[in-house]
Image: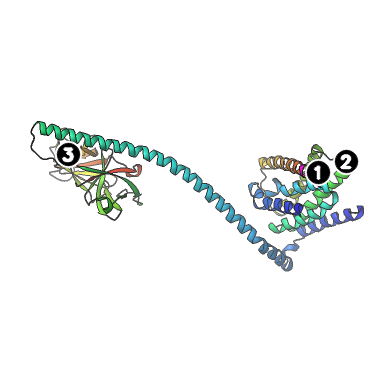
Amino acid sequence: MIFAGLILTALFLDVLLLQGYFKPGFLGADLTLCALLVSASFRGRDTIMWAVLIGIVKDLFGDSLGLNLALYTLSVYVFNLLLEKFLFKNLPSLLVGGLVALTLKKIGAFLLVSVKYSFDVSLSSVVLGVVLDLIFMSVFYGTALKFQEIRERFL
Amino acid sequence: MRERRFHVSALAFIVLGLSLYLSGLPETTYVKSAVNLANTLIMPVLKFKESSVKDLKENIHAYLDLVNVKKENIKLKKELEKLLLTEWELKACVRDLEKTLNLVKFTQKIERTNYSVSRIIYYDPSGLDRFVIIEGGKDRNFQEGDLVVVEGKILGFIEQVYGSTSRVVTVFNKKLSLPSYVLPEEKRFIYKGDFPLGKLLMVRKEDPLKEGTPVMFRLKGKLSPEFIIGEVIEVKRGDDPFFKEVKVKPSVDPRKEELVIVVKGR
């Protein structure tokens, strides 16, 4: 329940506030995907269903049905494969894996959107997006570790 | 999740997403109505976001305005203190003068002038600065014809007195006519307001009036300082066979002023 609440909060913050500051929005920071990737590093394969669900909800907020469904699922799927293949579970490895998944999502979004629409890409917006993604993942990972530690101590 | 099921379901959702996006299926009536329904459900969230962002912005602006108002209040308080001090000094001067007059047995009765500090609360929206509204009216015993001055410069006179406000016609208004004089000989003329330049009437062809001469005003029969109306900026011979055409630039800029002094009982 707590996890669902956090993911949905991240989604609403992402859609309602964060994306408006990046042009185009899909190349900017992605709070929801960062939360999903950090969650995948703790929960493993189960996160894929969350990625599907969040992808659909995010598609409903925009006018691109299917785009986020495909890209969120792909990113979390690839991240899970990397996680299982290299068995990493620390912050630097998470950041590298997360960066790969996020880059994959952004390149995919860029290619798919450019099929239908034309748009300008701001390099500063993309760089800022990557920096924010790394910060979000670090913060989420740190918080999740703390939360896990507290839970283990008291339960 | 099992190995095979995980891969198959992930790939299936990826393919489904791509096909939905690229096929244009969401444009079909049934899918579109489903999307519209979903959007309708999401709309309250969007409205909530819009209203909360708007409220937040309004609150931030209100806070910033409040900070400005506080700063402005401090500034005005200081100005008011200065003006009150000047008023007190003027009253002291009047007392001293009266004492001196008594000592030299000067018998002519000189009437005292009463002042009141007020504040401009509304400016002429037309931009021609023909009038201003000041604080105070019947409640402070202001009367029609009372002179309104700012730092020794004439702003205008009260045209209409309301309950707690008064309308002041400025030196830019055609309704305003004042008996005036120019230094050093104190030659007497009539100043008539106009925008952007006022006029000096009754200036005879032989009067040696030059550009840059200050046009002054003094209350008749009262103990009062002399006030400046403006400065002569153009002297022409004009079409009139007897009088010159003289233009005067008023010294006061109503939009830059806020605190004014009302000279009562003009």
Q: Which residue is mark 2?
A: A86
Label 3 neighbour load within 10 Å: few <14, some 14-19, many 20+? some
Is the C-beta separation of discs 2 and 3 under 8 Å? no
Looking at the image, which residue is at 79% across and 54% down? A50
Do callouts 2 and 3 point to residues on the same chain?
no
Is the C-beta separation of discs 2 and 1 under 8 Å? no
Looking at the picture, tell me which residue is in the foreground, B143 or B33.
B143
Label 1 neighbour load within 10 Å: few <14, some 14-19, many 20+? few
Q: Which numbered mark, 2 or 1, is in the foreground of this view?
A: 1
Q: Amino acid at mark 3?
A: Leu
Q: Where residue A137 is drawn, which disc sits there? A: none
Distance CA(mark 3)–CA(mark 1): 90 Å
Q: Amino acid at mark 2?
A: Phe
Of callouts 2 and 1, the N-terminal one: 2
Distance CA(mark 2)–CA(mark 3): 99 Å
Q: Which residues are magenta?
A: A144-155
Percent across and percent down for residue B43 are 64, 61
- Secondary-structure class at tag 2: helix
Percent across and percent down for residue B186 are 15, 36
Q: Is residue A124 left or right of residue B173?
A: right
Q: Chain of mark 1?
A: A
Q: Chain of mark 2?
A: A
Percent across and percent down for residue B175 are 23, 51
Q: Is residue A140 left or right of residue B146?
A: right
Total numbered badges shown on the rendered structure:
3
In which quadrant of the rendered view does residue B78 lie?
Answer: top left
Residue sitting at the far front: A154
Report whether residue B197 is seen. Answer: no
Q: Which residue is mark 3?
A: B223
Q: Is residue A103 left or right of residue B91?
A: right
Q: Amino acid at mark 1?
A: Arg
